[in-house]
Image (cartoon, rainbow, N blue to C red):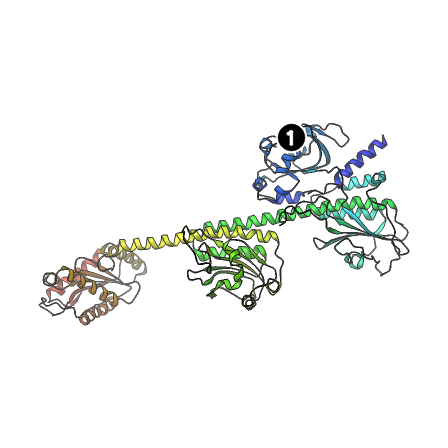
Amino acid sequence: MEAIKTDRHLTVCRSIVSTPRGHESNSSRSSFSKTQTIASGDSPLEDLPVGIAITNAVGQILHANAAVARLFDRPLEELLHNSIDSIGRTVLRPDGQPLPRRELPTAIALRENRPVADGAMGFFSDRGTLRWLAVTATPRPPSQGGGLTVTYTEIPPDFAPAVEIVEETSPDGEAATSPNPDENESNLSETRLERILDCFLGFSSHPQENIRRLLELVREQLEAICACYQSLKRDDSLSCTSSGAICPQNTSLCSGAEEGRGSSHLLSPDGGADKPQMRIAICQPSEPLRKPFSSEENAAPTPSVLGYLCVKYHPRRQPHPEDARFLHTVATAIAVEEERLRVAETLRQQTERELVVARLASRIQQSIELPEILESATESLRRFLDADRAIVCRFNSDGSGEILGESRREGISSMLGWKTNRPWIIDGRSHQLYVSGRVMAIDDIYRADLEPEAVQLLEFFDIRARLVMPIVIDSGEEGETDPSQPSSNVWGLLVAHQCREARSWHPSEVRVLPQLATQLAIAIQQAQLYSRLKTANRELSQLATRDGLTQVANRRYFDEYLEGEWRRLTREKSPLSLILLDIDFFKDYNDGYGHQAGDDCLKQVARALETTTRRPADVVARYGGEEFAIVLPNTDEAGAVCVAGLVRSTLRNLQLVHARSPVNPYVTVSMGVASLVPFPEAEPDLLVAAADRALYRAKQNGRDRYCIAKSRDF
């Protein structure tokens, strides 16, 4: 019976520590708020061998990646909308006994609303295939619709080692030969197996905390002064020391680890090798996850060192052959936790990238003005990349370029408004890359083989590294283009700068640029359409409010404008003046010179009247056939009389011949001037009627003059 118990514990331990193929963290799943990306072929989750499924509140599968379908030998469409507890024909415990469905981690997590993880369980698929899987089920918050996030990690049959013993140091300072950790692994004592199992069962959703637990387990089981772990991938280190001891991590024990598989001397805190020490290189799994941004899809992966597990023994404790096997088990578990951290970071970057694009799209929908759109785009890009500067450069039809949008860190010089007659000078040999719409990444301008003039220009703005993404807009026009100029479809460039120092751009950073550029291209097209629409509306408005012959305001606009100014000046209690004028003997002018000459006369008079109004608020309008009106807001009677006198002198200087006029050989006008402070009880017609009466008196008094409205005219 004891043997059975030991074998069962061994099976569970092996199942837990030998799942290097993409063990995923609960924290990473909780950060993955947009579950639809699981079903997207562009998602990195599609490349994971880890099965990931999302359920609703009653356990129905809403989304799953391809690995779930592979693990259960069922098409993905058959799994969707089925109960998560129904997949798999039969479920086995680690000891081979059937596992009731109600005891599945998914059933417990739904029932008790808490995260549940099981070490290993066997699933018989509908085809009769048995696969051993590690299953975790984590409830999703109500804000995301509830339900579960479930992961299925296949336990490989070969249990490939994830560690490599680099060196052991004996008390006399000589390297000691240790047994192969793969040999007789089952010889681990039952006590250690129990402690390993207890440690695993106490794991939380935080991989770093789990690694700390493992270090505490190592220090306890090996009676070590210190157990240290140095991560090379994350530039992080953890240690666990005995009471009163000083961690040698700050000396050469962990800090001297080199990335690679070569050995290095391990020294005690005092620099000697008088105490037993051991270091184990923790490597990536023998079948690691395919990197989602790998450029060589079919290249065989090569394991690399993730970090080093270092142990400093107590002077009274000598290394034992079983210690290496024990450390091998712990190192494998640390490798799994490192993989969980990597997957969590990948998901975090993907989520952040999607949020950046979503925020930009939202801002674009809220704005249709191009300057606001470019400001949002550059700010979003700079903050996401934590870059020094982000700009948008527009190409003009003549081949020149201009910086229209910019976001920069404090202390970085501005490029906004900068123009160049040859924007391709930045790297002319990359012209075809831009035209094809590809991202151009330069980690260091001094290693990029750029043209000398390009390097000089980049140095002028302190640019050391940069990312460039063309903004391609479908112009809808066909025809040949000049190959020496930017493509007619390339509107401009979206650029990120790192100043004063080189920078290695991460693939996830490069990947966000095409998404931002696509959203930006859509926004630019919307802004262009809106600009053209505003121009068309302005032209239509002018057609509706302008007199077709004289091109001054028409009678409709005069009425609307006078009404608006009357109301405004009523509130302000400010004066409003109006001049009505009539061309003297204009009927005789038409009869003598013809209607075409009459039209020319009206045009010249209208242009002359516009020169007499000095303020933007003053409006000249054609009131009738040969009648015109001048609206003078915030102008009292004296100011209106001044304008009337200016009208007479301007027309006199114009000297339009009018031989049939009995008062003057040139064209003249008669004017009526009215002014008052508007008040609520009256209407604008009161002012018009008073000016009209004054105009009538001017005609009665001999024409070629102006008369001022008296109080009796109102």
On the image, the x and y values in percent for residue 81 come to 58, 31
Quadrant showing the N terminus = top right
On the image, the x and y values in percent for residue 321 come to 87, 45
On the image, the x and y values in percent for residue 40 come to 56, 41
In the picture, measured across the screen, residue 468 lies left or right of residue 170, that is left
- The residue under the point 60% across, 51% down is 508
Quadrant housing residue 583: bottom left
The number of numbered discs placed on residues in the rendered structure image is 1
On the image, the x and y values in percent for residue 606 come to 22, 63
Quadrant housing residue 548: bottom left
Please tell me how crowded label 1 is: few (under 14), some (14-19), or many (20+) other residues with Cα within 10 Å: some
In the picture, measured across the screen, residue 588 lies left or right of residue 359, that is left
Q: Amino acid at mark 1?
A: Ile
- Residue 565 lies, with reference to residue 218, above or below; the image says below
Task: Please state which of residues 574 and 374 is positioned toward the viewer in this rendering.
Answer: 374
Task: Please state which of residues 501 and 683 is positioned toward the viewer in this rendering.
Answer: 501
Q: For mark 1, what is the residue? A: 87
Task: Please state which of residues 429 and 644 is positioned toward the viewer in this rendering.
Answer: 429
The reply to whether residue 15 is visible in this rendering is: yes
In the picture, measured across the screen, residue 186 lies left or right of residue 536, that is right
- The residue under the point 61% across, 41% down is 46
Quadrant showing the C terminus = bottom left
The reply to whether residue 681 is visible in this rendering is: no
Q: Quick one: SS at disc 1?
A: loop
